[in-house]
Image: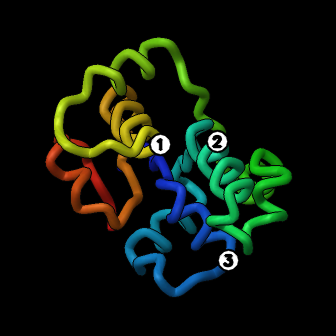
Amino acid sequence: MAPLLLDTHALLWWLDGDARLSAPARAAMEDPAQAVLVSAASAWEIATKHRLGKLPGAAAVARDVRGCVVAQGFAELPITLSDAERAGRLGGPHRDPFDRMLIAQALGHGLLLVSNETLFDGYGVARLW
């Protein structure tokens, strides 16, 4: 299986032990042989939404996203100039800049995007849920 790229909600639900994380996603993330990546876009999204009061329960994560990611054995995925160009060129109606970056990174790096967002399917991204 390709390396996993976690959508922000998948990361937060994993950290919280939230039952909304699907069983297939949880099983793949629990597999010690499976590479799991978290984009810098997710750190940006968590910090931004927490600051705006949209993620009040994520204060500890927002203070140290990297530490939370590393503690889970996941790896960080930086945003490259190529990722940014790809995200900027994406067509379609989806306007969320965080999601567009995740789509661009999944496509550009051959990653399996762990997300419940069916809208992503219209971009040709491989998605696990």
Q: Are marks 1 and 2 in contact (CB under 8 Å)?
A: yes
x and y, in percent, of residue 41 in the image: 56, 39
Instruction: Quadrant for residue 76, please give it.
Output: top right
Instruction: State the residue position of label 2.
Output: 44
Q: Which mark is residue 98?
A: 1
Q: Amino acid at mark 3?
A: Asp
x and y, in percent, of residue 38 in the image: 58, 45
Seen at 77% across and 45% down, the residue is 66
Under tag 2, what secondary structure? helix
Spatial CA distance of label 2 from label 3 is 19 Å
Whether residue 36 sits left or right of residue 48 in the image: it is left
Under tag 3, what secondary structure? helix
Instruction: State the residue position of label 3.
Output: 16
Label located before the other in sequence (1 or 2): 2
Residue 76, compared with residue 57, is above or below; it is above
Instruction: Quadrant for residue 2, please give it.
Output: top left
Between circles 3 and 1, the one closer to the viewer is 1
